Image (cartoon, rainbow, N blue to C red):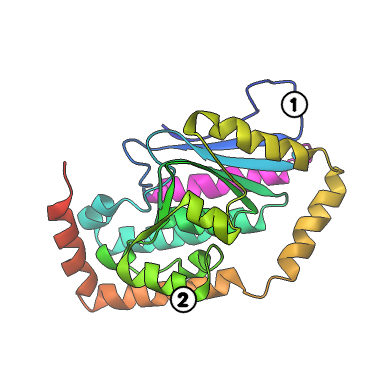
């Protein structure tokens, strides 16, 4: 359980690092998990022998966001920790020195959108769904990243309703590279990673920096702005009221 880094199963391939998240039962990450993920991605990207990082997860779904129970139990300090951890993890993916391919299965919610929205490419299983249930969980944020996956008005509708979009729908919008059966997900992500890793290592790093440099949105500043409203909701008591209601609806 936790965050681990490995080479592809074939072992003979060079230039690819696989960062895997595993926090049963639903990959809702505790505070330390977000920081561990940030460290793993940064370390992999800094390795001169790595030319592509695959971000993957074990279990039913790719990511269910932050650990709501931890925030309910520990209060404001856990909220601050979760916000800082998410900020660091999202930034680590975006600023990784080499391209990051996200391999997404099942649900990709909340913080998961922050991760894949900042990735360079997404490969998804046929059962993958993407969404921001933040308004149902007493929080705000990651609209910055959802806007990188779908057009502006669809982003707003999904955000306000807490609905999800399927992998097929995102593929139609061009934000998902491939949609494959779940059993083929890891290999499909590695196939794309191999193609990227076949490029010159120095040149691929320059390419990543160049593409980030022409990005029309400063994702760090934009997301940080959103986080301010999460704190406002928390200080005003709205967040606790919504989270308490959410907690009663969760099936144990």
- First to last magenta residue range: 31-49
Residue 89 visible (yes or no): no
Name the quarter where the C terminus is drawn: top left
Distance between mark 1 and mark 2 Cα atoms:
42 Å
Q: Is residue 129 magenta?
A: no
Q: Position of residue 18 (x, y in %)?
A: 61, 35
Q: Label 1: few (<14), some or many (≥20) within 10 Å? A: few
Q: Label 2: few (<14), some or many (≥20) within 10 Å? A: few
Q: Secondary structure at mark 2?
A: helix
- Numbered badge on residue 153: 2
State the residue in front, 184 or 210: 184
In the picture, measured across the screen, residue 139 lies left or right of residue 100, that is: left
Q: What residue sits 72% from the left and 52% below the top? A: 97
Q: Are marks 1 and 2 in contact (CB under 8 Å)?
A: no
First of labels 1, 2 by sequence position = 1
Q: Position of residue 84 (x, y in %)?
A: 45, 61
- Numbered badge on residue 236: none
Residue occupied by mark 1: 13
State the residue in front, 246 or 169: 169
Q: Position of residue 43 (x, y in %)?
A: 65, 43
Q: Secondary structure at mark 1?
A: loop
């Amino acid at each position: 359980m936790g965050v681990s880094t490995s080479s592809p199963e074939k072992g003979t391939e060079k230039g690819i690092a696989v960062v895997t998240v595993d926090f049963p039962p639903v990959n809702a990450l505790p505070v330390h998990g977000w920081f561990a993920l940030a460290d793993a991605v940064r370390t992999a990207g800094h390795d001169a022998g790595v030319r592509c990082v695959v971000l993957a997860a074990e279990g039913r779904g790719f990511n269910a966001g932050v650990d709501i129970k931890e925030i309910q139990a520990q209060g404001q300090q856990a909220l601050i920790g979760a916000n800082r951890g998410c900020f660091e993890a999202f930034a680590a993916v975006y600023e990784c020195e080499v391209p990051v391919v996200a391999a997404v299965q099942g649900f990709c919610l909340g913080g998961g959108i922050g991760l894949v929205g900042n990735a360079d490419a997404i490969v998804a299983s046929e059962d993958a769904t993407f969404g921001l249930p933040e308004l149902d969980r007493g929080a705000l944020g990651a609209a910055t990243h959802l806007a990188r996956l779908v057009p502006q008005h669809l982003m707003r509708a999904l955000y306000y309703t807490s609905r999800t979009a399927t992998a097929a729908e995102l593929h139609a919008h061009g934000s998902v590279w491939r949609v494959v059966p779940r059993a083929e997900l890891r290999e499909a992500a590695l196939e794309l990673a191999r193609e990227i890793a076949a490029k010159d290592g120095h040149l691929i790093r320059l390419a990543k920096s160049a593409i980030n440099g022409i990005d029309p949105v400063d994702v760090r500043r934009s997301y940080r702005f959103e986080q301010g409203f999460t704190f406002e909701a928390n200080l005003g008591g709205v967040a606790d009221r919504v989270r308490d209601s959410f907690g009663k609806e969760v099936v144990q």
